[in-house]
Amino acid sequence: MANFIESETAQRITTIRINRPDKKNALTDEMYYGLADALRAANADPATRVIVLTGTGDSYTAGNDIGSFVAQSNASKEDNARKPDGRDRHPVPDLLDALISVDKPTIAAVNGLAIGIGTTMLFHIDLVYASESARFAMPFVNLGVVPEAGTSLLLPRAVGRQRAAELFLFGDQFGPETAHECGFVNAILPADRLMPHVLEVAGKLAQKAPGAIRETKKLMRQHGPALDAAMHREARVFAAQLRTPESKEAMRAFAERRAPDFSAFE
C-alpha cells in the first residue's frame, strides 16, 4: 500500500504496518488517510477476523509529522476548514472514525516510540501490548495545542483527574510500566517476543465467535455520545489553538531544536 502504510493478511489476521522508519513513522496527512483506508478495508474483508497495528523499526509512530503541524498553523481558518477532495473528514478525524468504527478485534503492538496520536489512538484499540523499549507521550501542551482523540474524557476516567493532568500538562515521555499502570497497555514484553505474542493472541481471537465479538464491542461503546461530543470539542479547540502565537512559537522552537519561550504570553 502507498503512503508508507503496508497491509498483509494471513491466517485471518490482517497486520497493518506504519513503514516510515527514517522519520520514526511520523504521520503525514496521506498516511492518516492510508491507515484509515487500510482499517476500513480489513474490517470489510471476510478473510479478516483480527486487525493488528504496528510500526517498523524502533517506533510505533512518533505522532503527527511536524511539517503538517507547521502548515496547518500557518494556514488561514478558511484553508483549514476545507476538506480534501473526495474525503468526508480531515486526516486525523478520518483515522479516528475508521478506528472507532471497526467491529473486529484490534490489537496494537507498540514496538517503540508512541508519541501524540501514537498514544491517544491506543485508547480506541481493544488490546495493547508494548515492548520493554516502548515510550509514550502526549506532548500537546508543549506544542501549544490540546489533547485529541477523546482523551480529555477517557484518560481522566481511567486514571483520575490528577494523574491525567500530570500526563497532559507536562507532556513528558513515560515508559510501558506507567502505561500498564494507567490501564491502556495489557502487557509488556521483550522486543523479540512482542510480535510473536501479539500474533498468538490474535490467533486465539480469530477462532472465537465473530458475532459475539462484534456485539461485545458495541456494548463497550455505550459511552459513544459523550465520546463523540468530547472529540468534537477537542477538534474545535485544537484547530483554534494551532493558529495562536504561542503554538507558532512552540513549532518554531521544535524546528530550531530549542526550548520555546512563552514568557510574553498570558
Image (tube, rainbow, N blue to C red):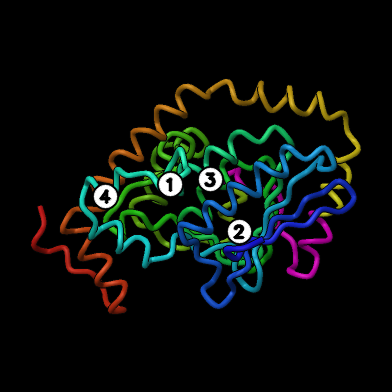
> First in sequence: mark 4 or mark 2?
4
> First in sequence: mark 4 or mark 3?
4
Mark 3, residue position: 95
Mark 2 or mark 3, which is nearer to you? 3
* Residue 140 appears left or right of 4: left
Q: How far is disc 4 from disc 1 in space, using C-alphas?
A: 13 Å
Q: How packed is label 2: few (under 14 Cα within 10 Å), some, or many (20 or more)?
A: many
In contact (CB < 8 Å): disc 4 and disc 1: no
Write the start and end of the magenta stretch as one range: 182-198
Mark 4 or mark 2, which is nearer to you? 4
Mark 1 or mark 3, which is nearer to you? 1
Mark 4, residue position: 79
Label 2 element class: helix
- Farthest residue in the front direction? 85
Q: How packed is label 4: few (under 14 Cα within 10 Å), some, or many (20 or more)?
A: few
Label 3 element class: helix
Residue at screen point 62% across, 63% down = 2
* Residue 41 appears left or right of 73: right
Q: How far is disc 2 from disc 1 in space, using C-alphas?
A: 39 Å
Rendered image: mark on residue 85: 1
The image quarter in which residue 199 lies: bottom right
Circle 3: residue type: Leu
The image quarter in which residue 217 lies: top right
Rendered image: mark on residue 176: 2
> First in sequence: mark 1 or mark 3?
1
Residue at screen point 66% across, 69% down = 56
* Nearer to the camera, 137 or 116: 116
